Amino acid sequence: MLRTEGASPDFVMLLWPDGFSVDQENDHTRVLDQSGQSIGRVGESISLGGGPIGQEGAKKAAGDSIPTECLMTHIFKVAKVATP
């Protein structure tokens, strides 16, 4: 699970669509879409569509696979990724 970092002092947990994954390539952590294409690496800016979702909604959307202690106050459910 990756999180955002920006102007706010609070982090935002990103809840990615099914099929998205994270891997390492040449010491860089990157996010892959459902087809295995890189959509961005840690430190890069990408544009996301979606919206906020509460902790209970996030647990339900993830099939209760998120441990409660890992849930953050701010959660954004990613619905769309705009690639450059």
Image (tube, rainbow, N blue to C red):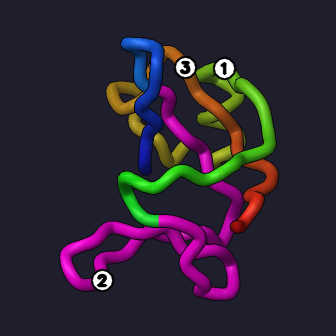
Q: Nearer the viewer, mark 2 or mark 1?
A: 2
Mark 2 and mark 1: Cα distance apart in space:
32 Å
| Residue 25 badge | 2
Mark 1 and mark 3: Cα distance apart in space:
8 Å
Helix, strand or loop at mark 1: loop
Helix, strand or loop at mark 2: strand
User: For residue 17: magenta?
Assistant: yes
Vertical relation: 19 (above or below) 71:
below
User: For residue 18: magenta?
Assistant: yes
Hey, what amino acid is under mark 3? His
Hey, what amino acid is under mark 2? Glu
Categorize mark 3 by other alpha carbons within 10 Å: few (<14), some (14-19), many (20+). some
What is the x, y in percent for residue 1? 43, 50
Total labels: the figure holds 3
What is the x, y in percent for residue 32? 55, 75
| First reached walking from the N terminus: tag 1 or tag 3 | 1
Circles 2 and 3: CB atoms closer than 8 Å: no
**Residue at point 37%, 75% (across, down):** 23
Mark 2 and mark 3: Cα distance apart in space:
28 Å
Helix, strand or loop at mark 3: strand
| First reached walking from the N terminus: tag 2 or tag 3 | 2
Q: Which residue is mark 1?
A: 54
**Residue at point 30%, 83% (across, down):** 25
Circles 2 and 1: CB atoms closer than 8 Å: no
Q: Which residue is mark 3?
A: 74
